[in-house]
Amino acid sequence: MKLQTLKPRLQIQRASSKNNWGSGRGGRPWRRLKAKIHLRDKYTCQCCGVVTMELELDHIVNIAQGGNDDESNLQSLCVPCHKEKTLKESRQ
């Protein structure tokens, strides 16, 4: 008995020919900017003042409210402060 070949039911998403690796937030330029801001802020949370290597880059004026990625709109926040700020912003 010969097995019948079935057609796939799911559409396969083809990889884009354009390589976007390293672009956008999380890409190499963003990581460099993040390191620059943390160094500028002396690895200090700009909210509570704790000094730590576990910092996140925060938009002072978030992107949804018209903020941008300019250095003057970026600050270092510790993880708890960043979570709290993000939660407050999401409620507005």
Image: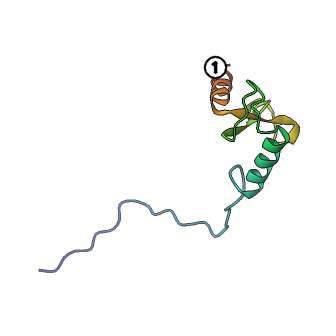
- Judge whether 37 appears above or below 28 on screen: above
How many tags in the picture? Answer: 1
The image quadrant that residue 75 belongs to is top right
Vertical placement of 28 versus 62: above or below? below
Residue 29, quarter of the rendered image? bottom right
Residue 40 to residue 48: above or below: below
User: Which quarter of the figure is the C terminus placed in?
Assistant: top right
Residue 3 pos. (x, y %):
19, 76
Nearest to the observer: residue 85 or residue 80: 80
On the image, the x and y values in percent for residue 14 come to 53, 66
In the rendering, at what x and y percent does residue 63 appear? 75, 35
Question: Callout 1 environment at 10 Å: few (<14), some (14 to 19), or many (20+)?
Answer: few
Q: Residue furthest left?
A: 1
**Residue flagged by tag 1: what amino acid is it?**
Arg
The residue to which callout 1 is attached is 91
Is label 1 in a helix, a strand or a loop?
helix
Residue at left 79%, top 30%?
60
Closer to the camera in the image, 68 or 52: 52
